[in-house]
Each structure stands twice: as structure tokens, then as C-alpha cells.
Image: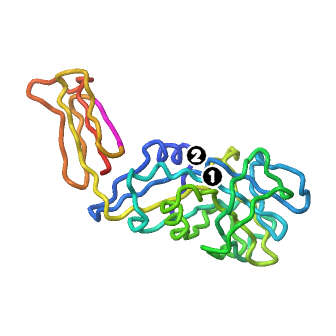
Amino acid sequence: MRLLSRSAAVLAIAVLSFLLPPAAARAAVTAAHGDTYVTAATPGQNFATAPTLNVNPQSITLLKFDLTALPTGTTPTQIAKATLLLWVNPSSPNPNGSLAVVPVAKDWNGPAVTYANRPTTLASPKTTQALRPGASSYYLEVDVTEQVKKWITSPATNFGLAVTAATPAVDVALDSKENAAGHLAFLDITVAGGKTVAVCLNGTETRVCSCTGKLVSIVRGGSCQATADTGSCSAMAAGMARDNPIASCCVCAL
């Protein structure tokens, strides 16, 4: 279980992916770039700026994710696992029972969507996940691997996910991206079968290292080093000052 503060989540997203031990796998973390909820209790009201997202028999949470954090050329067969993480807020009236996650069938606009004009959802892939009985202040983990694979196959069908009540008594509040606590919803995607390579450039001119695939990370300076699945490199050259700013080291995802 990993708990990300807002700053940690933003850092993970900025880096786009991080290296795992030599199992030829890496993970991409992407935060929800759109989230809201709609409710039959007030069918004409929009909740795009609400700090929490309600899920109960009358209320549905909607989430959108951008998958550009994945390495270019990622195929569905390379997705080893995709996990949706939802923070259960302490204000939840009844955090007991189960939630269901299904794909949204058509596009929606966060600042405009209401229960009255809510998008339809698909029956599958559907994942049902039990909440910890009576617990809050934790990330609920939901396996959405099959849905992410379908989005990679057909990117135009990525309209996000809907979180609904799978049991009649459940009534939970999930943190939104607008919540000051920073426990926004996010996807943690493990990509298998790919490789990362290290590229280092000695500081002899003002060029910087570059990638033929996706840039994962870059550091600069004469003492820079990079380690990747295929090995390591260093930009240190004989007689170079350790803080030479025109040396650079990159990690690239092929």
C-alpha cells in the first residue's frame, strides 16, 4: 500500500515513470485530470469543484485519465496490471459494502455534467471491490487492468470511469483533485516487457542528451550518471569539472 501526498503524486506524474528492479517492468502513475459526481437527489446540480466525490445508491462518481504517461508504443499485452486508487474520506457516512467501477460510454464535461445529462456507462469490464468495514483515510485499490487494455487498443473510447454503489447501504466520500489534502484519485499502471536505456553526453557543447523513445528522466552536470534496464553510463570526462552544466544524462523508455 502506498500513500501519496499531493506533492508526491505530482512528482510521480512529472517524472512519468520510474524504474523497478531488473524484471523489465516499470510503472506509470497518472492522476485524474477530471473528476466530479452527480446525484439523483439534485439532478440539475453540478459538483465539479466539490472537495469530495460521493458514491451511494443515488450518486455516481466520474473520473477521467490521460494515458500519455505510458511509453510510446505501449501495447495492451504489455499492461501487466492497472490499479485505480481512491481515497476514502473520513467524512464518509457509511463506508461499508462494495463499490463497482465501470467504463463510461461517452464523453462528458466536468464543469457541465449533472445527473440529468450524465453519460451512459458500459456493463463491462466491471470490477467490484469491497471497502474495509467501517474504515476511512486509506486508498481503496481497484483492479482496472482490462479497461486500460481496451483504452490502449481504442484510445478514442477513453471516456473515463464511473464509480457506483455495488451494495445498497454503501455511502462513501472520495477525495477529489480539488481537495486540499491532496489524496486525488490516480491510476498505477505496470508495463511489462519494455526496456529502458541510459544515454549520457559529455559536456563538450551545449547539446543535451535525447531519446528516440520517451524521456523518463534527465539530470545535468559533469558528475551525472544514469542507470537503466540495459546498464549505466556517466557523463564524467577527464578533467571535467564535476558541476559542468553542459553534461547531461537521460533515461529513455524504448
Q: Position of residue 3 (x, y in %)?
A: 54, 57
According to the picture, the residue beneath numbered tag 1 turns out to be 183
Q: In terms of image quadrants, where is residue 251?
A: top left
According to the picture, the residue beneath numbered tag 2 turns out to be 6
Q: Residues within 10 Å of mark 2 (few under 14, many from 20)?
A: some
**Residue 106 horizontal side relative to residue 186, left or right:** right
Secondary structure that dominates the magenta span: strand
Residue at point 61%, 66% (across, down):
140
Residue at point 82%, 71% (across, down):
57
Nearest the viewer among 19 and 210 is 210
**Residue 97 horizontal side relative to residue 211, left or right:** right
- Let me know if residue 218 is in the magenta part: yes
Q: Residue furthest top?
A: 205
- Let me know if residue 36 is in the magenta part: no
Q: Residues within 10 Å of mark 1 (few under 14, many from 20)?
A: many
Which numbered disc covers residue 113? none
Instruction: From this view, report whether residue 168 is shown above or below residue 193.
Output: below
Q: Position of residue 127 (x, y in %)?
A: 62, 74
In three-dimensional space, the C-alpha distance between marks 2 and 1, rounded to whole angstroms, equals 6 Å
Nearest the viewer among 105 and 192 is 105
Residue at point 36%, 45% (across, down):
214
Q: Position of residue 70 (x, y in %)?
A: 43, 53
The range drawn in magenta is 215-220
CB contact under 8 Å: marks 2 and 1: yes
Q: Amino acid at mark 1?
A: His
Give the mark count: 2
Mark 2 secondary-structure assignment: helix
Q: Position of residue 17 (x, y in %)?
A: 41, 50
Q: Amino acid at mark 2?
A: Arg
Mark 1 secondary-structure assignment: loop
